[in-house]
Image (cartoon, rainbow, N blue to C red):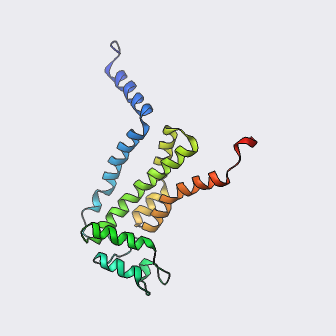
Amino acid sequence: DEGRRVTQRLHRRTASLVSAHPVIVASFVGIVVGVLATRHLLQPPTLAGGVLPAFPDGPSGLFRELVSAARTTGFGGSLPASPGIGLLGVLSWAMLGNTSLAQKVVLAAVPTLAAVLAYRAAMRLTGRAGPSTVAAGAYVLSGVMLWSFSQGRIGGLVALAALPILVERSDVAFGRDELSD
């Protein structure tokens, strides 16, 4: 390294860092991109637009919705309540009763959860960290994920977060037998 130019040494060290620790590098890049993408979520007091459901003023409204026989359209219509409403109520309670903040946390955290679950599913299938990191990044930056995030489709984001695990588990359960090759 002594006789090489500084740019060549920097290029070599960067390539070495990325190839040796792809998950750490991708996590750092993901954090930076995530902060930039969600920086406007902190400004408005209440999110509105897209298909984002209107949350009640307090966690008690979410718990009432969970046990109520008559539900609002945004929380499932006439079908039984999802246990997710109870989880939103607990999260709102943990956020000191601020349902708007809980909504923002869920909207920002679910794509991160999707990236982690996609990485873990890809690692189980491939056993290689580099390609699994790229797969998780591509999944979380896919059009359907970004569209769901921009529209505020919390239910769709949760379904997309669970999809990699479901696909991986289905492949394990119903995949071809490795001995028959």
Considering every residue shown, the one lying at the far right of the view is 180
Q: Where does residue 12 sit, x and y in percent of width and height?
A: 39, 24
Where is 116 relative to 155, above or below?
above
Which residue does the image show at 64% across and 54% down from the upper left? Answer: 173
Camera-side residue of 147 and 76: 76
The quarter of the image holding the C terminus is top right
Q: Where does residue 107 sit, x and y in percent of width and height?
A: 37, 63
Q: Where does residue 145 sit, x and y in percent of width and height?
A: 46, 58
Camera-side residue of 2 and 5: 2
To which quarter of the image does residue 91 belong? bottom left
Q: Where does residue 175 sit, x and y in percent of width and height?
A: 67, 51
The quarter of the image holding the N terminus is top left
User: Going by the image, does 136 lie left or right of 105?
Assistant: right
Camera-side residue of 7 and 19: 19
User: Does residue 173 appear in this view?
Assistant: yes
Which residue does the image show at 46% across and 74% down from the upper left? Answer: 82
User: Does residue 141 appear in this view?
Assistant: no
User: Going by the image, does 115 lie left or right of 125?
Assistant: left
Which residue does the image show at 35% across and 43% down from the upper left? Answer: 28
Which residue does the image show at 37% across and 47% down from the upper left? Answer: 30
Where is 77 relative to 25, above or below?
below
